[in-house]
Image (spheres, helix red, strand yellow):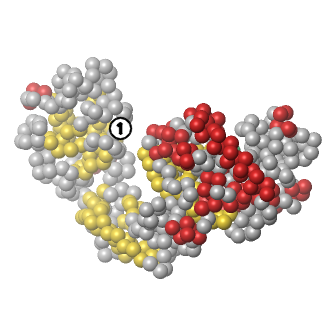
Amino acid sequence: MTEKLFHDRPHTILDAEQAEAQLETFTQQRQGGGNQVYIVPVVFHVIHNFGEENISDEQIHSAMESVNIDFRKLNEDIDDVIEAFAGITADVEVEFRLAQLDPQGNCTNGITRTVSDLTYVGDSDMKELIQWPREKYLNVWVCAYAQGAAGYSLYPSSVNSFFNEDQDGIVLKHDYCGYIGTSNWSRRRTFPHEIGHWLNLRHCWGNSNEPNIDENCDEDDLVDDTPWTRGWQSCALYGESCGTLDNVQNYMEYSGCGRMFTEGQKDRMRAALESSTAQRNQLWQESNLEATGVLTGESILCEASFSVSKDVVCMGQEMQFFDNSYNAPSSWTWDFGDGTELSGNDPEIFKNPIHTYEVPGDYSITLVVSNGTDELAVTQEQFVTVLGSGELDSPLVEGFEAGFPDDEWFLYNTEGAGWEVTNTASFTGDYSLKLDNYSNDIEWLEDQFFSRTFDFSEVDEALITFKWAYASKTMEATSDRLRVYISADCGESWILKEQLSGSVDMPTSEYSSSPFTPSSTSEWASASVSITNPAQLTET
Ligand SMILES: [Zn+2]
């Protein structure tokens, strides 16, 4: 990454060389230093395109928890360090805390989310999407692709220049961040490794990304107590690659079994934090800890918020509520709007509760969260719709003349333009539903609308008849589909009853190179879907 940076920005090479020399002198001349625990504010920027790289807050919390354990030598597997190195394992005395105040002083959970397909690139352009001031926060970007690596970071000297400030921080591939969600237990050590680089540590084998080559026996990592090594890509505990025993269990190896920093590495990292190179020495100043909301370590309650698994359900159907409040509420009071209240401080029960409504209607939900000191409340009016097993007036006719969506019809859109009521075309009356798919270039997006439930228990056959108008925007084959589904279990599962294809049986008009609006009733078609013995559906 360093080569790429200086290839793209050759005018910053000189500054980097001078900064490296200065920081090296500072590091070598540093005497002991105190044992103050340096606290570093951290912000995570999740760069995503709605894929699995959009990792949860909890996964990020697991990364923070784990890296703090490792940097304070509280990891249980420190006991497995082989005897030769057990005496030089280090408590680095650095602690990382998620920011609770953003650069403007507003409350934050220390996690930002930005939608961009640069998540698949993971390069300097991605970092330029968002960065908080590097003299106040350690910036960590999480993405789908990290330039072919599990993660990467630049040395303080490489980004010291004003021109390279925007590249300062750590990039983590999402499945190497923390130990839950898309990552796993062994991959959690990518983060301490990258922080090592961010604090001026080289790999144990020297200043390259290439382990296991002979030349590395002549390459220094500039740390006195780490032995010379070719570098390892396997966990050879008693390996002697350059004639002496190697420190294979070091975080700065590629061995996959890293679990320690040495005292020498600790000194080097603390020197980087005490140096003005890349403004590292401003991060842990008390004034900055105050400005970023991490001084006391107590959580600041910023915002009460919640979401729900499904906002249209049937009577008697379970639904789950999710508390999204931050930061770290310790008790929850839910008012489900149907006279039921749930209150308590056991997160297992009260943070993401399941509730069932027994009466149809629209319900407003209120959540009150507290951290023991402060309390915040949020209400969402008519947030949940509970459907009854409604009577069916036969025939039921819907022309969307009275608005959409409403008590009878509901909308579910994934993204972009969706179903909407329009008066630009209709078969009868003034209105119809339209889906503007003309300017959409992404294939297989789904736009759905669905009706309320009906009681078919006394019905032998139900007939659904609908009219549509459609023109393809191309003469080529198109993936456009219109599908009609029915559900006998309130939308838990769906049965496909009809499919019209944009290249075969859906067009009602010639292809149109401009957005299509039917101009007469002759450009509409009609189809019927028969459901025989609908009452039986509930039993299959
Ligand atoms: Zn590395």
Quadrant for residue 386, please give it: bottom left
Q: Quadrant location of ligand 1?
A: top right
For the image shown, how many numbered marks are present on the structure? 1
From this viewpoint, which residue is outermost toward the right?
243
Identify which residue is drawn at 55% across, 47% down.
Answer: 162
Q: Residue furthest top?
A: 475
| 398 w.r.t. 504: above or below | below
Location of residue 465 with respect to 298 vertically, above or below: above
Work out whether residue 434 or residue 21 is closer to the camera in this orientation and state it.
21
Q: Could you tell me residue 145's position as x and y percent?
A: 56, 39
Q: Is residue 212 left or right of 484 when viewed as pictured?
A: right
Using the rendered view, name the quadrant where residue 511 is placed: top left
Where is residue 370 shown, x and y percent of the image? 45, 76
Mark 1 within 8 Å of ligand 1, using the beta carbon: no
Q: Secondary structure at mark 1?
A: loop
The residue at the point 34 percent across, 63 percent down is: 316
Q: Quadrant of residue 78?
A: bottom right
Q: Can see residue 498?
A: no
Q: Tell me residue 323's x, y (percent).
A: 43, 65
Residue 169, visible in the rendered structure: yes
x, y (%) of residue 35?
74, 69
* Residue tagged 1: 445
Q: Is 373 positioned to the left or the right of 238 in the image?
A: left
Apparent side of residue 285 relative to residue 55 in the rendered image (left or right): right
* Quadrant (top left/top right/bottom left/bottom right) for the N terminus: top right
Disc 1: CA contacts within 10 A as few (<14), some (14-19) or many (>=20): few
Residue farthest along the bottom direction in this orientation: 373
Identified at 85% across, 38% down, the residue is 218
